[in-house]
Image (spheres, grey):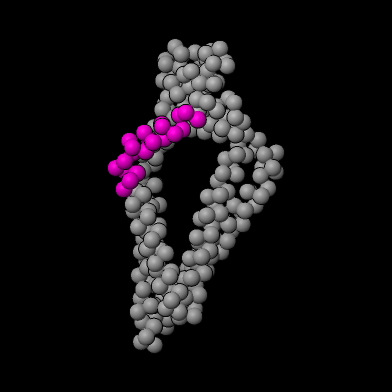
Amino acid sequence: MGCYSFLKVMMILFNTAIFLGGGVLLGVGIWVAVDGSSFANIFGSSSTLFVNVSYFLIAIGAVLVVLGFLGCCGAQKESKCLLLMFFSIVLIIFIAEIAAAVVALVYTSLAENILVGTVTPILKSQYGKATDVTRIWNTTMSEVKCCGLTNYTDFTDSYYYTNHNQLYPPFCCNTTTSSCNSAAAHASNIQGCFQQLLSDIRKNAGVVGGVAAGICALEIAAMVVSMYLYCHLDEK
């Protein structure tokens, strides 16, 4: 088996796996989005997070299905058009990932300022009032072990604060605190969710970097192979 035939077979197998994986993600995402009430009965307050994640799974699954189809059919039918489309989409995704990584590293403080300007007002006016907002934040603060977006002061003069005798949510104080007032919240010094998430990411920077490097390597390999097949079609 020559180099061209080997790469063609690998391209077909690799993109078949991508297509099937994308189909699974797409199916799961659609199932969770359509049958959200069943998840509400099973997971209770965490169900909203599952439904929100479902839209992300649908988007990722759809992209993988399209990529897998283009790559597999392009290699199988030896179509320069499909191979070029496959290469272009992977290149766009690769550039978008690099840009997102640069923005995340350079403009972390800017992202925090934007989030503070948009999320904090919602937190002040809707937490404890809107069921969905309250459930999402309760789940986030419980799982991440954090309080508010920046810290407990996000809840000062909020709807929750004024309707709970000027107390903060229990997540803003240590478990030993019976009444989460301003003094207790200040003494507990629970981090805001934004900084806590950043801290967790930094602690697992090696794993995150390894996964990112692996994904980038696969994308580069896919582009190289698709372009190799594209350029050698005329020589067959």
Residue in the image at 37% along x and 53% along y: 97
Residue at the far left in the pictured view: 106
Dominant secondary-structure state across the stretch colored magenta: helix
Residue 104 can be seen, yes or no: yes
Total count of labels: 0
Q: Is residue 106 above or below residue 117?
A: below
Q: Quadrant of residue 80?
A: bottom left
In magenta stretch: residue 106: yes
- Image vertical order of residue 12 relative to residue 97, above or below: below
Q: Quadrant of the C terminus?
A: bottom left
Q: Residue at x 38, y 77 (%)?
A: 230
- Residue at left 60%, top 29%? 130
Asked if 93 appears above or below 35 in the picture, the reply is below
Residue 20 x, y percent position in the rendering: 56, 64
Please provide percent x and percent y for residue 125. 52, 26
Farthest-out residue, bottom: 236
List x then y, in percent, for residue 65.
Answer: 53, 63
Identify which residue is drawn at 45% across, 79% down. 79
Q: Is residue 77 above or below residue 174?
A: below
Depth check, front residue: 231 or 206: 231
Residue 6, by quadrant, is: bottom left
Give the quadrant of the N terminus: bottom left
**Visible in this render: residue 196?**
no
Identify the magenta region: 102-122
Instruction: Using the rendered view, name the quadrant where residue 81 is placed.
Output: bottom left
**Within the magenta stretch, is there residue 222?**
no
